Image (cartoon, grey):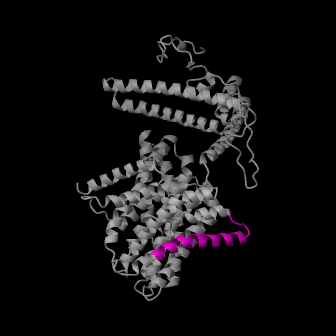
Amino acid sequence: MEQVVPVVGLVLGVLLVNGLASRTPVPPPILLLLAGFGVSFVPGIPPFEIRPDLVLFVLLPPLLFAAALESSAIAIRQLVRPIFQLAVVLVLLTAFTVAVTVTAVLPGLPFAVALALGAIVAPPDAVAAVAVARRVGLPRRLVTLLEGESLFNDATSLVTLKVAISAFTVASIAWAPALGEFAWAAAGGLLLGGGLGLLLSLVRRRVLAAGLGPGRNSALTVTALSLVSPFAAYLLGEAVHASGILAVVVTGLVLGHRSPSEVPASVRLTENATWAALRFLLEGTVFALIGLQLRGIFASLDTGQGSVFLVIGAVLVAVVVSRPVWISLIHVLSRLGRRGSPISWPGVVAVSWAGMRGVVSLAAAQTLPLDTPSRSLLLVCTIGVIIGTLVLQGLTLPWVIRRLHLRQDPRGDDERERARAHARVNAAINDKVDELCRSGELTGNQGELMRKWAALRDWRNWDDGDRSRAFGRRLGELSDWRRSLLAVERSVIVTMRNEGDLTEEVLRQMQHDLDLEEALLERRSEAVDGHLNELPPDEAGGPIEPGGADRGPDDRPAEQPASTPPPDVSDADVSALLGAEGPGRAPDPDPAPSSGRRSLDRDADPRWADPDS
């Protein structure tokens, strides 16, 4: 009981602070850290001390695995060279820069100890940088670059730290064995992660094919398997002395890439919702834990030494300054190469300033052996870098992005991509319908109905602004009307359950169906609103581009696939698009009964009697 109460309090505090963060301009990681530090002074609050193995074995693997599941393996492959430069080259350069700086300030400190500190503070946090970058509207390509860096740089940092720790007891670092250990950690982590990802993918397909659990049980079985995957990958990687972190990341990338083609929709919905909730909670918890530990760490520091604050300041300056210097140098060398650099100079500046440190650095610092020279000083330097980068860079990154004119709303890009995808889907559906009609498997009338359905789903590509607006308004009206029907149905089945006329199991099944239908209605309404907001303001109805032209490097509009000319919009067609029973089956919601309230009862409303009414 004594151990459970603090955990429950921590979780509730994280939820509360995250709720407050949505109402303030302060990024959630910074607010959580400050809140944790403030709470540590409250009388009766027990001291929190993170055990390094808790972070490295329990918190970090699922965090990185969840991030890898949501990342794009294709996008990371397209940026593999700059990601490698940031996740490997930059981490090593930063570690040695910090080591040289510390030994210059404290000449008596062994270089291996200074290198250990450099490896600890070298990698930017996997949570903070991307969270802030997304919130301030950094372009998607740069967000992908930061995600790729944060996924892979932890492996470089932890391997470098192991090499430095192993050199504490000797006069100098054995560079040849160190390079061999580093190479095996990287190669072994990549191979193990790729192989384990393919193996788990095969197991997942076999589980679904064998029907080990029908319906909901299949979803739960696959979700449980995915929850175990990051811990299995990490333990296997560490068992063969490879990088367990790298194995976790690659396993997540493989499973996330293969999921759309081999996991049923119901399973994917359950799995995604589970990981989203878990990631939300873990991300907040790690920063709150940092704040809760600050008081104890500062109390253990001998501030009587005059060089303490000098060392902390020197390390922070080295970390903050070295990142833009080394990134700029890497960028210049890349531009001198044949292929050039995929990132522009404004993007380089933004990435250079998105170097916040976090929980990985703190956990790595606490793995230092107890007999490490100046161990307390190294811990405080780590805390100083975490706080300094989170506050300095985290709070000023939005301003930097605005000054660089990089701020973008990703919804516009999403709408353009969705429009192109719908156009290609529509063309493929029409080709398939033509093939079925030629083979005699569909009648002419059935083929026409299928083409109309496909064209209606492709409404974002219509070239007539007035028609798009009319369709959007009608779709919104009927969506609201159908949601009111769903509310009536939900109220009825809950009442039947309360009266004992409906079992809890049947209620859950029906409730699940209603929830899916309502979620789809809400998503389509959001898509309509987003599209209407992107239409030009004039009502003349001239040609428009769906969501704005997608322009390439030379500012020419990207080629848009041709779309099928839309049919006339009718209430029946729109109702069919929303998932009604068929064209002409939904009543017109505009006319109201004489009582002033719409009748929602099929038997009482005569409009339900005639399907063509």
Q: Quadrant of residue 543?
A: top right
In x, y percent, where is residue 381? 42, 73
Left or right for 567, reference 4: right
Instruction: Pick the residue in front: 534 or 331.
Output: 534
Residue 329 among those drawn in magenta: yes
Residue 163 vs residue 379, the one in the foreground: 379
Q: How many marks?
A: 0
Residue 80 highlighted magenta (yes or no): no
Q: Residue at x 47, y 57 (%)?
A: 65
By secondary structure, the bulk of the magenta-drawn segment is best described as: helix
Answer with left or right where residue 346 lies relative to residue 249.
right
Q: Is residue 234 above or below residue 447?
A: below
Q: Residue at x 50, y 10 (%)?
A: 594
Relative to 330, does residue 29 appear above or below in the rendering?
Answer: above
Q: Is residue 441 at all visible to an observer of this figure?
A: no
Residue located at (56% from left, 75% from top): 93
The location of residue 156, given as percent across then percent down, is: 51, 71
Task: Report the span colored magenta.
Answer: 313-341
Task: State the image coordinates of residue 456 (x, y, percent, origin top left).
Answer: 65, 31
Residue lying at the far bottom of the rendered structure = 171
Relative placement, left or right, of 295 versus 471 is left
Picture quadrant of residue 383: bottom left
**Rendered position, 64 above or below 100:** above
Occupied quadrant, residue 48:
bottom left
The x, y position of residue 605, in whole percent, is: 50, 13
- The N terminus is located in which quarter? bottom left
Which of the two residues, 316 or 340, is positioned nearer the viewer here? 316
Which quadrant is the C terminus positioned in? top right
